[in-house]
Image (cartoon, rainbow, N blue to C red):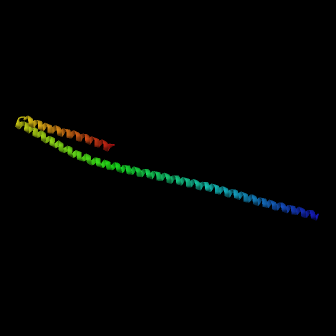
Amino acid sequence: MNGTNVEIQQEAYLTRNVNKKSSKSKLILKASKITISILVWGSLLYGGYFLANQYINETKDYINDKIAQIEKQNQKQMEVFNKLQIDLDEIYDELINIRGELLLIEEDLALTGETLNGTDKTKIALQERIDELNKQLNELQEAIKKLEDAAND
């Protein structure tokens, strides 16, 4: 019986050792799975963050480029607008001078008509000058309108 008891004890000991080894390997396997899962999720999170950050930076660069283009275009339009404003001011000054000349000519014409009693040559010359000034006035008014339209566009 002693031999059988020893054999049973040896068998029980071996079974316990196998169970201990089996539970250790199960524990190691479970720990490995958890570690791998954490590494996979960590990699996915980092990859998502990296891609999102890259997309945001590219979008920011694109927007900054567009803003720079718009600022450059705006600056060019302001230069054109300022030039047109200067031209418009010059035309207004010229228009005021022409109106002043027209008033003087009309006064002179009235005085000449009274003093010369309507000399045809004088009237014709003065009328031609008035027509010429009226033509210039109309041209200036058209130019002003074009400049105002260009400034509004």
Residue drawn at (38%, 49%), measured in percent from left and top?
73
125 versus 85 height, above or below: above
Taking the view exactly as shown, the residue that stands out farthest to the right is 1
The count of marks equals 0
In the image, 102: left or right of 38? left
x and y percent of residue 70 in the render?
40, 49
In the image, 99: left or right of 113? right
Q: Quadrant of the N terminus?
A: bottom right
In the image, 6: left or right of 67? right
Towards the viewer: 2 or 113: 113
In the image, 133: left or right of 60? left
x and y percent of residue 45 in the render?
59, 54
8 versus 130 height, above or below: below
x and y percent of residue 127 in the render?
13, 36
Towards the viewer: 138 or 20: 138
Q: Quadrant of residue 40?
A: bottom right
Residue drawn at (9%, 36%), measured in percent from left and top?
121
Towards the viewer: 105 or 44: 105
Residue drawn at (91%, 63%), measured in percent from left and top?
5
x and y percent of residue 147 in the render?
28, 43
Q: Quadrant of the C terminus?
A: top left
37 versus 140 height, above or below: below
Residue drawn at (12%, 40%), measured in percent from left and top?
105
